[in-house]
Amino acid sequence: MKPVGAVPLWVVPLELSTANWFVAKHHRHHAPVVGHRFSLGCVDASGFLHGVAIVGRPVARLAGSPSEVLEVTRLAADGTPNVCSMLYSACARAGKAMGYVRIQTYILDSELGTTLRASGWVNTVRTKGKQWVHSDGKPRRTDQPTCDKYRWELVLNDPHLVVVQRDDPLYEEMELPL
């Protein structure tokens, strides 16, 4: 049974520029992103945009191989019920269809993760917040929260089904059919 006042919603593909516009307008603590693998939006019957999800490669170096892991780098909504869980679920379905092994996202330690739990995601690790510098010595951006965060994940596909990439040492050892 739908909550009182719930409106029918649909998930639609978005250009990064549209998703970033929405993030700039609605996200509480992050700025728009530079790149993405894909972006999704949640619209009502009139086409009004109620939320967006931007999905890219893992931001942290050790968070997984970009050929196997997707990361929801931004999710923003206008407060319409069910938008966030609908977008998290749609991102996972798209990632599964594309053959990714896992999808992940990070939330602040002050956020509950209710929509992630409702979408079947699992809270796997708490990361310590800190100030850090890039490998080239440049300081980290200061417009983003440096508090502790929680990583939530969802396994999408069997990791043994991943294609060996050309830059993998195993690639040279493979015997390809003629």
Image (cartoon, rainbow, N blue to C red):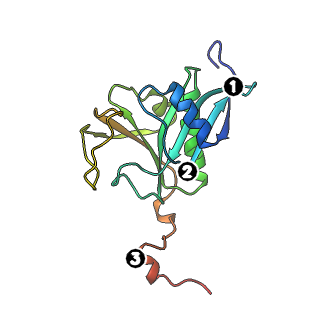
Quickly name the residue at label 2: 37
Secondary structure category for the residue under label 2: loop
Tell me which amino acid carries mark 1: Phe
Question: Does 63 sit above or below residue 1?
Answer: below
Q: Nearer the viewer, residue 48 or 31?
A: 31
Looking at the image, which residue sits at the far top? 4
Quickly name the residue at label 3: 169
Tell me which amino acid carries mark 3: Pro
Q: Nearer the viewer, residue 81 or 25?
A: 25
Neighbor class of circle 1 (other Cα within 10 Å; few <14, some 14-19, many 20+) is: few
Where is residue 114 shown, x and y percent of the image?
A: 45, 27
Quickly name the residue at label 1: 48
Q: Nearer the viewer, residue 150 or 13?
A: 13
Mark with earlier residue (2, 3): 2
Residue that appears at 75% across and 25% down: 45
Question: Does 160 sit above or below residue 100?
Answer: below
Where is residue 149 shown, x and y percent of the image?
A: 32, 35
Marks 2/3: CA distance?
25 Å
Direction from residue 9 to residue 118 in the image, left or right = left
Tell me which amino acid carries mark 2: Arg
Can residue 37 be seen here? The reply is: yes
Looking at the image, which residue sits at the far bottom? 178
Q: Quadrant of the C terminus?
A: bottom right
Neighbor class of circle 2 (other Cα within 10 Å; few <14, some 14-19, many 20+) is: few
Residue 26: numbered disc: none
Direction from residue 16 to residue 110 in the image, left or right = left
Mark with earlier residue (1, 3): 1
Residue that appears at 52% across and 25% down: 26
Mark with earlier residue (2, 1): 2
Residue that appears at 35% across and 34% down: 144
